[in-house]
Image (cartoon, helix red, strand yellow):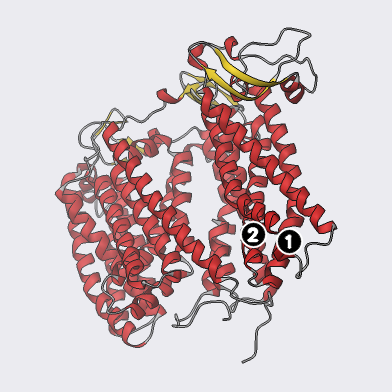
Amino acid sequence: MLESAFIGIMAFGWKRVSRPMHLFATCMVAFAASVSAFWIMSANGWMQTPTGGHFVNGIFLIASHIDSIFNPDAGWAFAHMWVAAIEITVFVVGGVSAWHLRRGTHVDFFLKSFKMAVVASIIATPLQIFLGDGSGKSVYEYQPAKLAAMEAHWETNAPGEGAPWHIIAWPDKSRRENVWQLDVPYALSLITTSSPTGTVRGLKEFPPEDLPPIWPTFYSFRVMMGVGFFLFGVMLWTVWAWKKGRLTVDRITSQRTLLKAWMTAFPLSYIAMEAGWITREVGRQPWIIYGFLRTNESATTLPATVVGGSLIAFIAFYAILFFVTVLFIRRIILAGPVHEAPDWTPRTR
Amino acid sequence: MQAIQPHLPDIWLFLIAFFLLYYAVTDGSDLGVGIISLFASDETERGMLMAAIEKTWHANQTWLVILGGMMFGAFPLFYGVVLSTLYIPIVLMLFGFGMRGAAFEFRAHSESKRKWGLVFGFGSLFAALAQGFALGGLLGGLDIKGGAFSGNVWAWATPFTAFVTIGVICGYVMLGSNYLIMKTLGKMQDRSYRRAWISSCLTLFIAVATYAWCLEKYPFMSEKWEAFPDDELIAVFPALAVCAFLMLFRSLRKRHEAAPIFWNAAIIIFSFAGLSIGMHPYMIPHVISEAVTTNAAAASPMTLSFMLVVALILIPILLLYTSYEYWVFRGKTMKDDHGYEE
């Protein structure tokens, strides 16, 4: 709500409010968006780690709203998602800048925005890897079945032995094992417990009806993580290039591969976020409220045809919206900046 | 907190009603302008109409999200039953909102302004129709058995609902016209005066007919009238609503600029209050099985009081900056009003 009121002033109010007021409105939009993100992630976190009350006859009785809001998952989830949003913005700005720099259009302008993106990525990319690690440890603690599915880890490792980390694997739910796998020994124990021989509970410890689908959980997690490290690598590469003095108006346009990497990072950053959400939500299955309420028990009593019909309509609507949005965003990017220089002083005509 | 505990459901009912009305007046004007835009003579006029609401429609629409949150928190049973029973109108409304929001952004960047202008107009019309269906369904009594959804997703689709929907459309066109009287000049303002006359006469007729129909159908409502004049509460708001209509007609005749929208808002508030007092304590009037009453549908007192504390802190802040936003964008809409220097 805060966001929608101030975004009006931010977008249309330049001539109507003073400059400090406009800056304030912009800050309020950023602040309000962050607050929204917190509440969304707090609610979703509660579905992962429900705390602050207990279930009586299928009704959740709240004992403490504070405990519910600040449930164990909420902090990690909010931080991880908030930085993900920042990281996407960084690579969208950087990717668009890189595209113009490669074409040699508006070089002055886009070199500036490119460098801003690079500076932001120095903070965002390693921070996100750290937060991802923390989120993973939270899953290990509170949702062991989800963690086992994320890693296609079937057998609990014996004391004194380390659990390996599968780079890729072919999990088979009916045979309750991986058909084949490519391992890094001890790595899973090390990542989750900070000890090379820490115990990581395997999928076989849980009743089959309590297990999430393994394939999407396992691979979406790898896609997210892979992109996360790719973005981190792009950042390191660019910082190195900057140090070598290649990020200048004369030399930047010839950094073809580096700029191409930034352009690739633009869509990849979105894919990483979507993949992360698939890990999070598919991995939570079969629960809608983890450990208490199953997804199929919470389904609506509306006729399936009505719900299915509206789902198809939503998919069609958003597919069209996505297509048109891409077209218009492409047009806006092609047009380049409206102002040659980011000079916001009112001009006298 | 102890003293107000028994009244918590009523306090929340009042808060929700307040924001429902706030939403109906502000976004009702936006939807009305959207419907009017379907009759725009050319793209310049349509652009002007869209520019008149461009800055505030988004904030106005967001009140619906707040309403949904309040309803979900304070009256979860009501929320669950209503959203299931009115699933089709609500989905239609969401598509309408989606079309309206997308059209605003895309029209600005598109070369075929006409196409996106129509998407905007039809989006507004769909959302208004859907709200009419929902209101008709609620007033007409939904098919609810034992406080649960019965499975009939078309229960709202009755001739009465169709009649109420026409009323909602007329009401929104009236709001939109009165809003445009305030925001425009010249030929567009003249047209808005004419539209305001026609739509307000139609709205008055449909509102009176709807009220009479409810009296006929719901004995608990007519009983309150039988107690009149000993208990005059039931008559106060209908009388005020009629007065507000008269004041609206007077301000239109005198060609006032800001008064019509003010009296229009008063009409909405008084009519709604009159109807609610007639219905109280029923939230969904019910003929098939027992009614869902305010108290039975409410959440636990702990949740209600927790929400109340939060709401009492946040609502003044919300209203403060929303008023500021309106203040920033006050005055007439100009053709070249794009906000940024170009």
Viewer-side residue, B293 vs B178: B178
Q: Secondary structure at mark 2?
A: helix
The label on residue A116 is 1
Does residue B32 appear in the picture of this structure?
no
Q: Residue furthest bottom?
A: A349
Viewer-side residue, B141 vs A76: A76
Q: Is residue B224 above or below residue A3?
A: above
Q: Which residue is mark 2?
A: A93
Residue A236 image position (x, y, % from top left): 78, 48
Question: Is disc 1 in contact with disc 2, using a CB cutoff of under 8 Å?
Answer: yes
In the picture, the quarter occupied by the C terminus of chain B is: bottom right
Q: In the displayed structure, does residue B142 sit left or right of residue A256? A: left
Viewer-side residue, A128 vs A69: A128
Q: CA distance from mark 1 to mark 2?
A: 9 Å
Report the residue at 73% width, 52% height from top: A121
Q: Is residue B264 above or below residue B127?
A: below
Q: Is residue A124 above or below residue A150?
A: below
Residue B284 image position (x, y, % from top left): 30, 41
Viewer-side residue, A327 vs B125: A327
Image quarter for residue A17? Answer: bottom right
At label 1, which amino acid type do we have? Answer: Met
Q: Dot 2 falls on which chain?
A: A
Crowding near the residue tagged with mark 1, few <14, some 14–19, many ≥20 C-alpha atoms within 10 Å: some
Residue B96 image position (x, y, % from top left): 34, 56
Report the residue at 64% width, 41% height from top: A227
Does residue B19 appear in the picture of this structure?
yes
Mark 1 vs mark 2: tell me if same chain: yes
Q: In the displayed structure, does residue B130 sit left or right of residue A339? A: left
Q: Is residue B162 above or below residue A341?
A: above
